[in-house]
Image (cartoon, coloured by chain):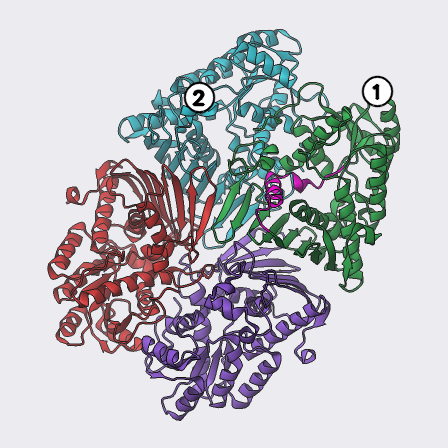
Chain colours: A purple, B red, C green, D cyan
Amino acid sequence: MSAAHGAAPPGRRIRLGMVGGGEGAFIGAVHRIAARLDDEYELLAGALSASPEKALRSAQALGLARAYPDYATMARAEAARADGIEAVAIVTPNDQHAPVAEAFLAAGMHVICDKPVSTTLAQALRLQELARARGRILAVTYNYSGYPMVRHARRMLRDGALGTLRMVHVEYLQDWLTEALEETGQKQALWRTDPARAGAGGCIGDIGTHAYQLAAFVTGLKTHSLCAELSRFVPNRALDDDAQILLRYVGGARGMLWASQVAPGNANELRLRVYGSKGGIEWSQELPNQLHWSPFGQPTQKIERGTAAANADAARVTRLPAGHPEGYLEGFASVYTEIAQALRAARNGAAVPKELSFPDITDGVHGMAFIEAAMRSSRQGGEWVGVGVDEAL
Amino acid sequence: MSAAHGAAPPGRRIRLGMVGGGEGAFIGAVHRIAARLDDEYELLAGALSASPEKALRSAQALGLARAYPDYATMARAEAARADGIEAVAIVTPNDQHAPVAEAFLAAGMHVICDKPVSTTLAQALRLQELARARGRILAVTYNYSGYPMVRHARRMLRDGALGTLRMVHVEYLQDWLTEALEETGQKQALWRTDPARAGAGGCIGDIGTHAYQLAAFVTGLKTHSLCAELSRFVPNRALDDDAQILLRYVGGARGMLWASQVAPGNANELRLRVYGSKGGIEWSQELPNQLHWSPFGQPTQKIERGTAAANADAARVTRLPAGHPEGYLEGFASVYTEIAQALRAARNGAAVPKELSFPDITDGVHGMAFIEAAMRSSRQGGEWVGVGVDEAL
Amino acid sequence: MSAAHGAAPPGRRIRLGMVGGGEGAFIGAVHRIAARLDDEYELLAGALSASPEKALRSAQALGLARAYPDYATMARAEAARADGIEAVAIVTPNDQHAPVAEAFLAAGMHVICDKPVSTTLAQALRLQELARARGRILAVTYNYSGYPMVRHARRMLRDGALGTLRMVHVEYLQDWLTEALEETGQKQALWRTDPARAGAGGCIGDIGTHAYQLAAFVTGLKTHSLCAELSRFVPNRALDDDAQILLRYVGGARGMLWASQVAPGNANELRLRVYGSKGGIEWSQELPNQLHWSPFGQPTQKIERGTAAANADAARVTRLPAGHPEGYLEGFASVYTEIAQALRAARNGAAVPKELSFPDITDGVHGMAFIEAAMRSSRQGGEWVGVGVDEAL
Amino acid sequence: MSAAHGAAPPGRRIRLGMVGGGEGAFIGAVHRIAARLDDEYELLAGALSASPEKALRSAQALGLARAYPDYATMARAEAARADGIEAVAIVTPNDQHAPVAEAFLAAGMHVICDKPVSTTLAQALRLQELARARGRILAVTYNYSGYPMVRHARRMLRDGALGTLRMVHVEYLQDWLTEALEETGQKQALWRTDPARAGAGGCIGDIGTHAYQLAAFVTGLKTHSLCAELSRFVPNRALDDDAQILLRYVGGARGMLWASQVAPGNANELRLRVYGSKGGIEWSQELPNQLHWSPFGQPTQKIERGTAAANADAARVTRLPAGHPEGYLEGFASVYTEIAQALRAARNGAAVPKELSFPDITDGVHGMAFIEAAMRSSRQGGEWVGVGVDEAL
């Protein structure tokens, strides 16, 4: 167990607030566990629902010290307190991400926002500008980047173990929307298939963007252009439920990205494969404690989290010995814990320490550029379109 | 995410203390995360090391409200406070389990003790008697019983899905003691291979007992007798590092148990297979989110945690949707959370609610009976010996 | 073991010749084993190399009854004999497939040709015409269609088990051309990367066409159009070594096809996934004895070859009980054995029996249409192009 | 494809006869394919059933040149012919193995006998004596020894890659006898559960002996003693259907062997694990093309048949490139092909070439010693008994 884990020394915990995540929500509880797991935060305040009554009731149920009926009130009130929150976690449906983030950045607080960071690229760029102007951290919880073996892979590729990168294949497959679940009134399905709340992308925004970020995080490759087929397979669905995409990376590598919410038998099958001139790697979120590494011409090795073969970047975010599986919550918590480390540095006016690699608004902007490019390509019948942030504006 | 998870309502958290788990320890930090994960406990007091200075330094590093130089002082002082701890977690080396548990039970507190609960069966029986006499809960953290798919399997077997049970095969394989790690001074290896601190069993006590408890927990079978070969493969090692055992269960089922700490390529490979007249199941700790179920004559099914196919017993201890892996800490936390539910019932003088199934001193006693029987058999050249708790005395 | 296997009744064996497959060849020996395995053929004649001396030497080494210096001589001579061969197996490099097939069809013999059946679509269409005109069978050894669980899947889809088909994902990954093996003079690499012998397609023709045929064989879907990125990643290579393709099927299903010869860690990883409104399937050539079937909302089932759960189409081409793996040679042999059954029907002037489903010139034509469309799309910068056989001309 | 495969040079094929394997048999057809696959044998004569009419009818159906009503007639007649068979394959139920083998050895022919070689150790020893006296080869088809990665493992262990061997775990699990299949009249179940035809061991003789031979073949270890629990789980079954065994090897290694025919979900799961002071290996018959090798302290490697990482012993019995799976028939055929190589050496009066490692009567004798020791131990309530061939007499 690495030194950082197990407990926070007294007085070090980050004072945290939360917007969204009240009754019936999913991701809010995940963020709370993630914040709590390494004892790096204390959750003090919240505006946990768009409905004021629900917001207050939910806060009480959680035992929050300070409950607010809405996020604007909360931002003002917390900014006015000497012991106010230092950071806010935003776990609302997508359409509220940008307005809430803006309010708290404007009030001088750091922001931890779920993905996608906004519903348009323009909003994301505005947030980026605002965070810069205010000198605040705007983290975006692309949580899969917190898995130890993802970190291991990223370091391997940076160190050149694969040689020149050639092909990337990333897929994120689910099956929960195989039928018209939204027509049953199920809350998660309702908002995630509703353009007004999810944004213009369905599957592409919900999980396609995770797949895209994972590939970029590990490979460091920039996307030049893409060709996308977004499909709506379930009748009457308002948003895409499947996305098949070809990618051209700057420098000549080629990629395939597949995201689907209608692939029976797949729950959260996020899987990345990268091949270069010297070898290949493979990683899957459902079996996250292993990385398969195939040096060309030699047997494939199964590198296990927590062993001597796992590198220092993996070890930094490892809590347990090999063979005791860590999972989704631990990866999510590692992102939170790295953000806490950055926030503590910020208390002293220091920049984000170099050894940290949690995703932030830059990932958020690239995510939105990807979503918009994919939708543009698909609308144009699968034409190739650029993905550069500049040209996308 | 089931209702119980995500946060504890205000005022409900159990006041917890800890003995052991200071600097350099492993399992103490695991217990702390497990207690924290579902926000069911607040850790207030500790005597974290056998060395008073280390104990105080460790408590300060963790920000504990009340630090004690030794466990006896702590038991007395906490018993005297109106806001004293309600329960203590014992995470010392094995030889201290029983004396510490006795002290806190005597002081009127509940106990959460790591396994094995003692170093002799006689001690375990005394603890059982004491807990009964004082009306206190004495939980033993056989944590693998907290995995959702272990709960699923247990329920399936109770409901008769496998028909008459015939064969059980359980193994727990590690490799970290393949070489004489204890000679390098590594702390975990030192005490776990030292009869004075670990008790008379090495591998059999450290992990064999986990395997034995898992099989018993899932199958509900009582052991009639066993035949054991305990080996010390590494030269100069004081305790067994491998155990191969045949088991005869009451009722006619037959079992094999293999525990090893010298099996290269295995980190914590705890794997259970059970076969009956109607089907078979298989579960592995390294891939804990799946249970393989083979109804005789039909294809094997992979039952996933978090899906509709997982039963209510699994769902009770499930936090995340399918495909987002839960791991060792979540299973451990589920044991802690169930203990908290029992402790809250105890606050009101109620018995342990029936739906809970965390392991307790009964498991602790059976674990010690197993260890002693295995050692007796091995000393007698692999003779068959009884395992019944009565005849073992 | 199904009735058909184990031995051919006397006098029933097909009289077979072979062109290509002499010294240093790979696939020739595979065809010979495939023909021999079920004892359905006797190999009597051959022109085993483009070099007359090698051809004769190779035939002698194999103990062939009749050795020929070249295929034209062989076609004439065998046609003139009362006991001449009934069919010829063509196992030369690709550029010779069409001329040899034409010669033997013209001489009145049936043909079993390795894939791709030609180097241009126009040739393939000409062969199709010729075979029809002469009333001869022109089988093409897309051998993966011979695997029992591929047959099982095909039947499931025909019977509607998956509902409306939505997505197809097929990939065929190898790594043997990761470096410039052709520069070392290795024979297989030499011809397969030489446009003069392999045809205009490299990876796309060698293995992409296998992947394409497998998807079509199982799904029965017709391709409407595609968008292809063919890459040459290894410097100085004359042909593509990687192909990433999006497919639009007639009827609205969408597909992705990836073929690569530069993916380290993959030997012959041919893997097919198909998803529909009611469920999904997955099959992999490297683990061919299982089919994973995921009915929506229920656990994934592992259907094993040789069990009661395998359907009649699988059972027809199954030799062994479950758990005793059948592999590549058995699948290849099943194609050969089905061809023999058709040839015996032809002896009596009967049409190909309906229960047979070995691939033939129709698959060959579609394969060439696919290759040409992919190359056209790639040359045009990844534009979408039609794949219909008519429009491709 | 190694040089030996693909075809036999003219005149080299071994003249083979067969006893047993007529209508309704399973293993006879396997032997015929195994003999044919590499074109090393021609099957000329047979007494294919204990019933003379069935024997003649079966031989005709197979197109055998010479059909006999019974084996004694066949042995005499073939011995009298100049072109008589050189070897006989015995594929009857177990009780006929020894008498048939004796008859053909006495007639001067080599013998290829299915396992177990007899129904008693005494018979096996007599056969060994007779084969020696007559200077004939008596091969026993423990076919799993023919798998390439089993050969690879054997060589690794001989070369010391694992250091001092410590633990062996071998299991062979089936499920086909989970219910009382013999009561339905199914032919395979009938004779295999009938002491008069199968011999005194059921599961232990049918598959336990395969597991035992595999472990011995790979490790080279001699068994000192064992402790066995043989069970009959299915009511009214005459023979054991499950065997759980502890083994003490000469030199200090310890082993566990589990054979079962009542383990639902297992078809032919033969799996071997061996651990030593320097590393561990794992191999499974259902995924035979890979060997998992775990050098202590380093990642586990997946060594693939057909790659550069596979050693020369594996390459000798490899036909196909990596990724194209070879299976049960290929492994069986490799045993047959090695026997053919020995038989050709014998034609010239030469001894069995050293590079061959097909199993023979020595394995047969050890197999019977194992069966008898296991049955003796079980009868004596699970006592430890010696397994040495001498003391077993």
Q: Nearer the viewer, residue D228 or A170?
A: A170
Query: Would residue C159 be counted in the magenta stretch?
Result: yes
Q: What's the residue type where badge 1 is placed?
A: Ala
Q: Which mark is residue D378?
A: none
Quarter of the N terminus of chain B within the rendering? bottom left
Q: Position of residue B254 (x, y in %)?
A: 31, 37
Q: Which of D353 and D385 is in front in this view?
A: D385
Q: Please tell me whether residue D278 is drawn above or below residue D35 in the rendered image.
A: below
- The residue that label 1 is drawn on is C82
Magenta part of the chain: C139-163
Q: Residue D191 carries which label?
A: 2
Instruction: Name which residue lies at 27% across and 27% down.
Output: D380
Q: Where is residue D182 in the image (x, y as percent from the top left)?
A: 42, 25
Q: Please tell me whether residue C308 is drawn above or below residue A350 in the rendered image.
A: above
Assign a secondary structure to mark 2.
Answer: helix
To which chain does the residue with label 1 belong?
Answer: C
Assign a secondary structure to mark 1.
Answer: loop
